[in-house]
Image (tube, grey):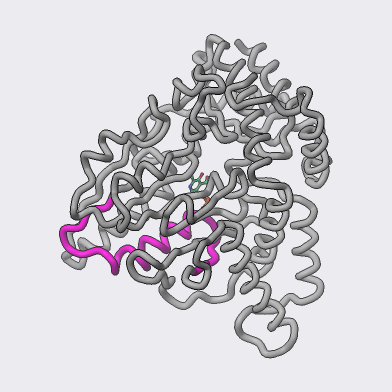
Amino acid sequence: MSAAGPLPGTGHDEEALWQRELREQFPIVTAHPESAYLDSAATSQKPRAVLDAVQTYLTTSNANAGRGTYPWANRTTELVAQTRQRVKEFLHDPAPDRSGVHFTSGTTEGLRGVARDWLVPYLTDGDEILVPHADHRANLDPWLEAQRLLAERGVDVRVRALPYQEVSGDYDHRVLDGIVGPRTRFVAATHVHHVYGGDMNVHRIRAAVGPDVPICLDAAQSVGHLPVDVGELDVDFVVFSGHKAMALPGTGAVWARNARGPVFRPGGWQGTPNTAGIVSLRAALDWLEAAGPDRIARWTAGLTGRLTDRLRHLDPYEILGCQVSLAAGSALPAAQRRHGIVTFRHRDIPSDDLGFILYSHGFMVRADNLCQAGRGEKDGSVRVSLHVYNTVEEVDRLLSVLESLA
Ligand SMILES: Cc1ncc(COP(=O)(O)O)c(C=O)c1O
């Protein structure tokens, strides 16, 4: 038994068949059986249903949205509106009449939009905001920029750091409890960490800050990988990259609850939306829903457990992040599991070199500092990130190569 429960593809034939059927729907994956794409945290591959939806749209009703009066334009406007609804459904929005969905190019643009267009007008002199300092820099820079913009207007806002804690695998909650105060007006957090792979346990943040403080969740590594339920998470913004969730490059969205604080209204003239990308996002969410986000999560958790169970015993490798979870076996709380992301170093082989070596064996992994913000890892690393199209055989092949390098 792996740390994450039964292993996929080992006696669980129904799961293996289900996965094979899904994998066959990815043309780029099946066209390259000799390679293994292990970089889904950077961007996902796209199933045929998504490619077909885009082709159909572009060859039957391509026009601009919200502008024309003729059928193609009306159809495009309708598709954009339907995708907004689809995003709300996919996120299990408990009050869809009140919330809003704004399309972006990805998480970076979405978080920046929340910072500039919502946070800046919302904060007043002396307010405090809590932001992560070891997560993706897309979830730090916008909040620092908001602080700068406010300072230029004479509004002094304090930014307090939410540190990562290796033992619990989420934010350091002793620090969190110590920095929450009556002036805490906003928290930015991450759902699944892009380096350590852990669920950052936003429930504990909600418990610490109480019911009234808005929380913005960077869900770049969770949407498409596991069920995301905004009612249950009790957050106010969910920002994600469609392109990491099976949709086309250049797609993403901000979901805003619009219940705590002002309504989110993206500022400025928005211009022509990425209609083909938005169409692809709808098809991607349909595809993911049909596949089952909980099933996808079980599959990738099984692969992750298989990888870490062996890798942690290979002497020259250091797996980054929560060490407790590596040894905890099936007793592991869900929040401490690695969700399809395993980042590691080799004691003697620099990470860039390890990346090249792995590519020479057909493995596409990420090898650098992974865009981690200020208080992140100082040295480079190799990140393996898995999705539903990855197989047990790919993980085993990777392990054999890593073993040969040990
Ligand atoms: C946690 C996290 N946040 C934000 C981003 C940025 O996403 P994008 O490049 O789609 O804007 C990433 C991308 O790797 C990420 O992993």
Q: Position of residue 144 (x, y in %)?
A: 30, 53
Give the position of the C terminus as an image quadrant.
top right
Q: As rendered, which of 43 and 131 lies closer to the eye?
A: 131
Residues drawn in magenta: 100-129
Q: Position of residue 358 (x, y in %)?
A: 66, 25
Vertical relation: 82 (above or below) 26:
below
Does 124 lie within the magenta span? yes
Vertical relation: 108 (above or below) 119:
above
Give the position of the N terminus as an image quadrant.
top right
**Residue sitting at x 49%, y 62%:** 255
Does 388 lie within the magenta span? no
**Residue sitting at x 79%, y 32%:** 16
Task: Quadrant for residue 310, please give it.
Answer: top right
Pick out the residue farthest to the bottom. 69
Q: Position of residue 250 (x, y in %)?
A: 60, 59
Q: As rendered, which of 33 and 213 lies closer to the eye?
A: 213
Q: As rendered, which of 235 and 149 lies closer to the eye?
A: 235
- Left-right relation of 283 to 21: left
Q: As rendered, which of 83 and 47 lies closer to the eye?
A: 83
**Residue sitting at x 38%, y 41%:** 373
Count of all numbered marks drawn on residues in the image:
0
**Residue sitting at x 47%, y 25%:** 320
- Left-right relation of 405 to 121: right
